[in-house]
Amino acid sequence: MALDINSLAQGISKHVSTCTSARFLFTTQASFESWFRVELVPVLVELGVDYETVSPDYTYPSTRYKADLVCSGKGGRTLIELKSFVSGQDANKKDRYPDQIERLRSLLAQDASIGQVITFTTFQGYSPRQITTLIGRLFDSSQWSMVGPIPVVDEYPSLQFLIAGITKIH
């Protein structure tokens, strides 16, 4: 089962708006990648992913690199990478994230058991122009379907997110 990234985007916004810790998330200039990884799980389950198939334990073949989440369904495994960018704190992330994105894309092409790859990227304190420029450097729009950038919740527009995905056509 391939995940619909539009439904995933709507689901995460709806879910996050109900979390008591969300206010801290929106008002703090810090990276919360692990928080989003945990909070994506109930959203995935709500979208029909079997809870038992969701795991933070996937190592890319012949590497020591790990995906943030993996889940399984009828269409194969879905790998999910998360990255949280915070204005003024991201030099290393900006250098490493393109490699992670390419690793996902390549694995989708090479591994028959992978049916979909998804990135969940947040931008805290970036201007719309800065976000657009960074997205243009990271994602080839001819290969990646994208939803966003949009506010995680409308009340706090300084925290934006983008979901990008590629689904293998069988």
Image (cartoon, helix red, strand yellow):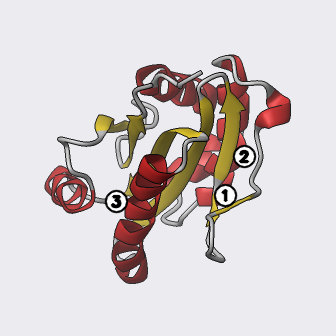
The residue drawn where x is 53% and y is 66% is 30
Q: Residue furthest right?
A: 52
- Image position of 17 (left or right of 165): right
Question: What is the crowding at mark 1: few (fewer than 14 residues within 10 Å), some, or many (at least 20)?
Answer: few
The residue drawn where x is 21% and y is 50% is 140
Residue 167 location, quadrant? top left
Q: Dot 1 corresponds to which residue? A: 34
Question: What is the crowding at mark 2: few (fewer than 14 residues within 10 Å), some, or many (at least 20)?
Answer: few
The residues bearing labels 1 and 2 have C-alpha atoms spaced at a distance of: 6 Å
Which numbered circle lies on residue 125?
3
The residues bearing labels 1 and 3 have C-alpha atoms spaced at a distance of: 18 Å
Q: Position of residue 13 (x, y in %)?
A: 51, 29
Question: What is the crowding at mark 3: few (fewer than 14 residues within 10 Å), some, or many (at least 20)?
Answer: some
Q: Position of residue 152 (x, y in %)?
A: 45, 37
The residue drawn where x is 62% and y is 73% is 62
Q: Amino acid at mark 1?
A: Ser
Q: Amino acid at mark 2?
A: Val
Is any atom of residue 19 visible in this view?
Answer: no
Q: Dot 2 corresponds to which residue? A: 38
